[in-house]
Amino acid sequence: MDNQICKKFQDLLKNFPDELDNNKKYKFNDDKPFQKYCNSNCDADLGKINAGCLYLFNEIFEDSSLKNHNKISIVEYIMIWLSYMLSLKENELKDSLQHFYRTYINGSGHYNKSIIGVENYSSYKDLLNKKKYFEDMDNNIISNFYKAFKLLCELYTLFDKNNQDCKTFSEKANQFVKKYNELSGDHNNINVSSYKQVLCTLSTDYDNFINKCNDTHCCKSSTLPTIDKNKIPVNCPEQTIQISDAASSPSIAKKLIIVLSIFAAIPIFLGIAYKYSLFGFRKRAPKHLREKIKNIKKKMVH
Protein backbone atom coordinates (compact mmCIF):
# COMPACT_ATOMS: atom_id res chain seq x y z
CA MET A 1 0.00 0.00 0.00
CA ASP A 2 1.19 3.52 -0.83
CA ASN A 3 -0.07 6.76 -2.32
CA GLN A 4 0.18 5.32 -5.86
CA ILE A 5 -2.30 2.57 -5.02
CA CYS A 6 -4.56 4.93 -3.12
CA LYS A 7 -4.56 7.35 -6.03
CA LYS A 8 -5.99 4.58 -8.23
CA PHE A 9 -8.89 4.19 -5.82
CA GLN A 10 -9.38 7.94 -5.47
CA ASP A 11 -9.46 8.39 -9.24
CA LEU A 12 -12.13 5.71 -9.33
CA LEU A 13 -14.22 7.39 -6.61
CA LYS A 14 -13.93 10.77 -8.31
CA ASN A 15 -15.59 9.33 -11.41
CA PHE A 16 -17.72 6.69 -9.70
CA PRO A 17 -18.86 7.83 -6.20
CA ASP A 18 -19.31 5.29 -3.41
CA GLU A 19 -22.86 6.43 -2.72
CA LEU A 20 -26.20 6.30 -4.52
CA ASP A 21 -27.68 9.36 -6.24
CA ASN A 22 -31.01 10.95 -5.33
CA ASN A 23 -32.81 8.28 -7.35
CA LYS A 24 -31.09 5.50 -5.37
CA LYS A 25 -28.97 4.55 -8.35
CA TYR A 26 -25.25 4.19 -8.98
CA LYS A 27 -23.90 7.06 -11.04
CA PHE A 28 -20.83 7.80 -13.14
CA ASN A 29 -19.65 11.40 -12.88
CA ASP A 30 -17.49 10.67 -15.89
CA ASP A 31 -17.90 7.40 -17.78
CA LYS A 32 -14.89 7.79 -20.10
CA PRO A 33 -12.47 5.75 -17.92
CA PHE A 34 -14.99 2.90 -17.83
CA GLN A 35 -16.32 2.76 -21.39
CA LYS A 36 -13.98 -0.02 -22.54
CA TYR A 37 -15.25 -2.22 -19.69
CA CYS A 38 -18.95 -1.56 -20.20
CA ASN A 39 -19.80 -3.58 -23.31
CA SER A 40 -22.81 -1.28 -23.87
CA ASN A 41 -24.27 -2.45 -20.58
CA CYS A 42 -23.27 0.24 -18.12
CA ASP A 43 -26.81 1.51 -17.80
CA ALA A 44 -27.40 -1.30 -15.31
CA ASP A 45 -26.18 -0.89 -11.75
CA LEU A 46 -24.12 -4.08 -11.70
CA GLY A 47 -22.66 -3.18 -15.08
CA LYS A 48 -21.27 0.01 -13.57
CA ILE A 49 -19.79 -1.84 -10.59
CA ASN A 50 -18.27 -4.45 -12.90
CA ALA A 51 -16.67 -1.69 -14.99
CA GLY A 52 -15.27 -0.10 -11.82
CA CYS A 53 -13.86 -3.43 -10.63
CA LEU A 54 -12.16 -4.16 -13.97
CA TYR A 55 -10.84 -0.60 -14.01
CA LEU A 56 -9.11 -1.16 -10.65
CA PHE A 57 -7.60 -4.48 -11.69
CA ASN A 58 -6.26 -3.17 -14.98
CA GLU A 59 -4.96 0.09 -13.50
CA ILE A 60 -3.11 -1.72 -10.71
CA PHE A 61 -1.99 -4.98 -12.32
CA GLU A 62 -0.96 -3.52 -15.68
CA ASP A 63 1.05 -0.66 -14.16
CA SER A 64 4.70 -1.76 -14.29
CA SER A 65 5.66 0.86 -11.69
CA LEU A 66 3.65 -1.12 -9.13
CA LYS A 67 5.40 -4.44 -9.78
CA ASN A 68 7.08 -4.52 -6.36
CA HIS A 69 3.86 -4.08 -4.39
CA ASN A 70 2.17 -6.84 -2.44
CA LYS A 71 -0.65 -7.22 -4.92
CA ILE A 72 -2.33 -10.01 -2.98
CA SER A 73 -3.14 -7.59 -0.16
CA ILE A 74 -4.29 -5.02 -2.73
CA VAL A 75 -6.91 -7.53 -3.89
CA GLU A 76 -8.19 -7.43 -0.31
CA TYR A 77 -8.89 -3.71 -0.74
CA ILE A 78 -10.51 -4.24 -4.14
CA MET A 79 -12.81 -6.80 -2.51
CA ILE A 80 -13.63 -4.39 0.32
CA TRP A 81 -14.58 -1.75 -2.25
CA LEU A 82 -16.56 -4.24 -4.37
CA SER A 83 -18.42 -5.67 -1.37
CA TYR A 84 -19.22 -2.21 -0.05
CA MET A 85 -20.55 -0.96 -3.40
CA LEU A 86 -22.72 -4.05 -3.75
CA SER A 87 -24.02 -3.62 -0.20
CA LEU A 88 -25.52 -0.23 -1.08
CA LYS A 89 -28.30 -2.07 -2.92
CA GLU A 90 -29.34 -5.65 -2.28
CA ASN A 91 -30.91 -7.85 -4.91
CA GLU A 92 -34.07 -9.81 -4.15
CA LEU A 93 -32.10 -12.86 -3.04
CA LYS A 94 -29.88 -10.73 -0.77
CA ASP A 95 -26.77 -12.37 -2.20
CA SER A 96 -25.23 -9.42 -4.00
CA LEU A 97 -21.63 -10.63 -4.00
CA GLN A 98 -22.56 -14.21 -4.91
CA HIS A 99 -24.75 -12.88 -7.71
CA PHE A 100 -21.90 -10.71 -8.96
CA TYR A 101 -19.59 -13.75 -9.01
CA ARG A 102 -22.10 -15.81 -10.97
CA THR A 103 -22.91 -13.06 -13.46
CA TYR A 104 -19.60 -11.33 -14.09
CA ILE A 105 -16.61 -13.18 -12.64
CA ASN A 106 -17.72 -16.67 -13.66
CA GLY A 107 -20.09 -15.61 -16.42
CA SER A 108 -17.74 -13.55 -18.59
CA GLY A 109 -14.20 -13.83 -19.85
CA HIS A 110 -12.92 -10.46 -18.61
CA TYR A 111 -11.69 -11.86 -15.31
CA ASN A 112 -9.79 -14.68 -17.02
CA LYS A 113 -7.27 -12.15 -18.29
CA SER A 114 -3.73 -13.41 -17.79
CA ILE A 115 -1.53 -11.59 -15.32
CA ILE A 116 2.20 -11.73 -14.69
CA GLY A 117 4.30 -10.94 -11.67
CA VAL A 118 1.96 -12.54 -9.12
CA GLU A 119 3.23 -15.93 -8.07
CA ASN A 120 0.74 -18.84 -8.11
CA TYR A 121 -2.01 -16.74 -9.74
CA SER A 122 -2.67 -16.64 -13.46
CA SER A 123 -5.74 -14.39 -13.76
CA TYR A 124 -7.95 -11.85 -12.00
CA LYS A 125 -10.40 -14.66 -11.34
CA ASP A 126 -7.73 -16.65 -9.47
CA LEU A 127 -7.04 -13.66 -7.26
CA LEU A 128 -10.72 -13.03 -6.54
CA ASN A 129 -11.37 -16.67 -5.74
CA LYS A 130 -8.70 -16.43 -3.05
CA LYS A 131 -10.82 -13.76 -1.35
CA LYS A 132 -14.27 -15.33 -1.66
CA TYR A 133 -14.62 -15.30 2.12
CA PHE A 134 -16.05 -11.79 1.74
CA GLU A 135 -19.28 -13.50 0.63
CA ASP A 136 -19.89 -14.54 4.23
CA MET A 137 -19.30 -11.12 5.77
CA ASP A 138 -22.14 -9.06 7.13
CA ASN A 139 -22.78 -5.69 5.47
CA ASN A 140 -22.07 -3.86 8.73
CA ILE A 141 -18.63 -5.47 8.88
CA ILE A 142 -17.96 -4.56 5.25
CA SER A 143 -19.00 -0.97 5.94
CA ASN A 144 -16.56 -0.67 8.85
CA PHE A 145 -13.71 -2.24 6.90
CA TYR A 146 -14.40 0.18 4.07
CA LYS A 147 -14.32 3.18 6.42
CA ALA A 148 -10.99 2.02 7.86
CA PHE A 149 -9.59 1.48 4.37
CA LYS A 150 -10.63 4.97 3.20
CA LEU A 151 -9.03 6.58 6.26
CA LEU A 152 -5.83 4.64 5.62
CA CYS A 153 -5.77 5.75 1.99
CA GLU A 154 -6.33 9.37 3.01
CA LEU A 155 -3.27 9.11 5.26
CA TYR A 156 -1.12 7.82 2.43
CA THR A 157 -2.26 10.50 0.00
CA LEU A 158 -1.79 13.25 2.61
CA PHE A 159 1.77 12.15 3.15
CA ASP A 160 4.28 14.74 2.01
CA LYS A 161 8.00 14.34 2.67
CA ASN A 162 8.40 18.11 2.84
CA ASN A 163 5.71 18.47 5.49
CA GLN A 164 7.36 18.64 8.91
CA ASP A 165 4.11 18.99 10.83
CA CYS A 166 1.99 16.10 12.02
CA LYS A 167 -1.17 18.18 12.09
CA THR A 168 -2.36 17.06 8.66
CA PHE A 169 -2.03 13.40 9.67
CA SER A 170 -2.97 13.30 13.34
CA GLU A 171 -6.73 13.67 12.90
CA LYS A 172 -6.99 10.96 10.24
CA ALA A 173 -4.55 8.72 12.12
CA ASN A 174 -6.59 8.98 15.31
CA GLN A 175 -9.76 8.22 13.37
CA PHE A 176 -8.14 5.19 11.77
CA VAL A 177 -6.80 3.77 15.05
CA LYS A 178 -10.18 4.32 16.69
CA LYS A 179 -11.95 2.48 13.87
CA TYR A 180 -9.35 -0.31 13.95
CA ASN A 181 -9.81 -0.72 17.71
CA GLU A 182 -13.57 -1.00 17.17
CA LEU A 183 -13.01 -3.74 14.61
CA SER A 184 -10.49 -5.63 16.74
CA GLY A 185 -12.86 -5.39 19.71
CA ASP A 186 -15.67 -7.21 17.89
CA HIS A 187 -15.75 -10.38 19.98
CA ASN A 188 -18.29 -11.99 17.65
CA ASN A 189 -15.88 -11.97 14.72
CA ILE A 190 -12.33 -11.56 16.03
CA ASN A 191 -11.70 -15.32 15.96
CA VAL A 192 -12.92 -15.73 12.37
CA SER A 193 -9.86 -16.30 10.16
CA SER A 194 -11.08 -14.12 7.27
CA TYR A 195 -11.88 -11.27 9.68
CA LYS A 196 -8.41 -11.53 11.21
CA GLN A 197 -6.85 -11.55 7.74
CA VAL A 198 -8.36 -8.16 6.90
CA LEU A 199 -7.22 -6.78 10.27
CA CYS A 200 -3.73 -8.04 9.47
CA THR A 201 -3.70 -6.21 6.16
CA LEU A 202 -4.96 -2.96 7.70
CA SER A 203 -2.56 -3.04 10.66
CA THR A 204 0.43 -3.89 8.49
CA ASP A 205 -0.20 -1.05 6.06
CA TYR A 206 -0.78 1.40 8.91
CA ASP A 207 2.50 0.35 10.56
CA ASN A 208 4.23 0.79 7.21
CA PHE A 209 2.83 4.31 7.02
CA ILE A 210 4.08 5.11 10.54
CA ASN A 211 7.55 3.80 9.63
CA LYS A 212 7.55 5.83 6.43
CA CYS A 213 6.60 8.93 8.36
CA ASN A 214 9.26 8.32 11.02
CA ASP A 215 11.95 7.71 8.40
CA THR A 216 11.35 11.14 6.87
CA HIS A 217 10.86 12.85 10.26
CA CYS A 218 7.54 14.21 9.07
CA CYS A 219 6.11 14.38 12.59
CA LYS A 220 8.51 16.38 14.70
CA SER A 221 5.80 18.23 16.61
CA SER A 222 4.05 15.13 17.89
CA THR A 223 3.88 11.38 17.43
CA LEU A 224 1.15 9.56 15.55
CA PRO A 225 -0.93 7.00 17.44
CA THR A 226 0.12 3.39 17.07
CA ILE A 227 -1.95 0.23 17.15
CA ASP A 228 -1.70 -1.71 20.40
CA LYS A 229 0.20 -4.90 19.52
CA ASN A 230 -2.28 -6.86 21.62
CA LYS A 231 -4.96 -5.85 19.12
CA ILE A 232 -3.07 -7.28 16.14
CA PRO A 233 -4.00 -10.92 15.42
CA VAL A 234 -1.39 -13.51 16.33
CA ASN A 235 0.60 -14.92 13.38
CA CYS A 236 -0.44 -12.09 11.12
CA PRO A 237 0.87 -13.17 7.66
CA GLU A 238 1.64 -9.71 6.26
CA GLN A 239 2.96 -8.56 9.62
CA THR A 240 5.36 -11.49 9.75
CA ILE A 241 6.61 -10.71 6.23
CA GLN A 242 7.06 -7.05 7.07
CA ILE A 243 9.08 -7.78 10.18
CA SER A 244 11.28 -10.43 8.59
CA ASP A 245 11.98 -8.44 5.42
CA ALA A 246 12.47 -5.01 6.91
CA ALA A 247 12.87 -4.74 10.65
CA SER A 248 14.88 -7.93 11.12
CA SER A 249 17.28 -7.63 8.21
CA PRO A 250 20.08 -6.11 10.38
CA SER A 251 19.68 -8.85 12.97
CA ILE A 252 19.83 -11.50 10.24
CA ALA A 253 23.11 -9.99 9.05
CA LYS A 254 24.50 -10.03 12.59
CA LYS A 255 23.49 -13.66 13.05
CA LEU A 256 25.12 -14.57 9.75
CA ILE A 257 28.37 -12.87 10.81
CA ILE A 258 28.33 -14.78 14.10
CA VAL A 259 27.78 -18.11 12.35
CA LEU A 260 30.58 -17.43 9.86
CA SER A 261 32.88 -16.42 12.71
CA ILE A 262 32.18 -19.69 14.48
CA PHE A 263 32.94 -21.70 11.36
CA ALA A 264 36.17 -19.74 10.88
CA ALA A 265 37.21 -20.34 14.49
CA ILE A 266 36.60 -24.11 14.45
CA PRO A 267 39.73 -25.01 12.37
CA ILE A 268 41.87 -22.79 14.62
CA PHE A 269 40.65 -24.49 17.79
CA LEU A 270 41.04 -27.92 16.23
CA GLY A 271 44.60 -27.07 15.21
CA ILE A 272 45.46 -25.89 18.71
CA ALA A 273 43.89 -28.97 20.27
CA TYR A 274 45.79 -31.24 17.88
CA LYS A 275 49.07 -29.48 18.64
CA TYR A 276 48.64 -29.79 22.37
CA SER A 277 47.55 -33.41 22.09
CA LEU A 278 50.80 -34.19 20.25
CA PHE A 279 52.81 -32.26 22.82
CA GLY A 280 51.17 -34.20 25.61
CA PHE A 281 51.83 -37.47 23.86
CA ARG A 282 55.51 -36.61 23.41
CA LYS A 283 55.81 -35.82 27.12
CA ARG A 284 54.05 -38.97 28.19
CA ALA A 285 55.86 -41.37 25.81
CA PRO A 286 59.35 -41.44 27.53
CA LYS A 287 57.81 -41.75 30.96
CA HIS A 288 55.57 -44.58 29.81
CA LEU A 289 58.58 -46.37 28.24
CA ARG A 290 60.64 -46.12 31.43
CA GLU A 291 57.81 -47.63 33.48
CA LYS A 292 57.53 -50.52 31.03
CA ILE A 293 61.30 -51.28 31.33
CA LYS A 294 61.10 -51.24 35.14
CA ASN A 295 58.22 -53.71 35.11
CA ILE A 296 60.11 -56.07 32.78
CA LYS A 297 63.20 -55.97 35.03
CA LYS A 298 61.11 -56.80 38.11
CA LYS A 299 59.60 -59.79 36.34
CA MET A 300 63.06 -61.02 35.31
CA VAL A 301 64.31 -60.74 38.91
CA HIS A 302 61.37 -62.73 40.26
Image: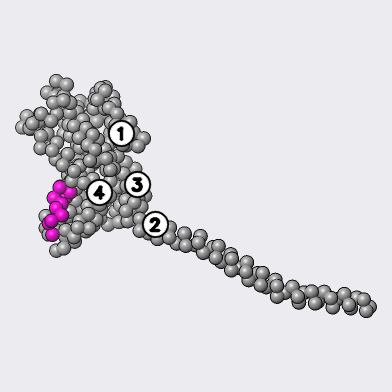
Is residue 158 located in the magenta-colored stretch of the structure?
A: yes
Indicate which disc, 1 or 3, sits on the residue closer to the N terminus: 1
Local packing at callout 2 (Cα closer than 10 Å; few below 14, some 14-19, many 20+) is: few
Near mark 1 (Cα within 10 A), the count class, few <14, some 14-19 or many ≥20, is few
- At horizontal 43% and vertical 60% (from top left) the residue drawn is 257
Q: Earlier in the sequence, mark 4 or mark 3?
A: 4
Location of residue 162 in the rendering, given as x and y in whole percent from the top left corner: 13, 56
Could you give the CA–CA distance between mark 1 and mark 4, rounded to whole angstroms? Answer: 23 Å
Nearer to us of marks 2 and 4 is 2
Magenta range is: 154-164
Of the numbered discs in the image, which one, if any, rests on residue 246?
A: none
Give the quadrant of residue 219: bottom left
* Foreground residue among 236 and 276: 276
Image disc number at residue 116 = 1
Q: Quadrant of residue 122?
A: top left
For the point 29% across and 53% down, the residue is 231
Q: Secondary structure at mark 3?
A: helix
Residue 65: x and y in percent read 22, 40
Label 3 crowd (10 A; few <14 / some 14-19 / many >=20): few
Q: Which corner quadrant of the image does residue 170 belong to?
A: bottom left
Choose the circle earlier in sequence order: 1 or 4. Answer: 1
Q: CA distance from mark 1 to mark 2?
A: 31 Å
Quick check: can you spot residue 102? no
- CB atoms at circles 1 and 3 under 8 Å apart? no
Q: Which numbered marker is on residue 205?
A: 4
In the rendered structure, which disc, 1 or 2, sits on the residue that comes first in sequence? 1
Q: Is residue 145 left or right of residue 298?
A: left
Depth check, mark 1 against mark 4: the one in front is 1
Q: Secondary structure at mark 2?
A: helix
Amino acid on which the number 1 mark rests in the picture:
Ile
The residue that label 2 is drawn on is 252
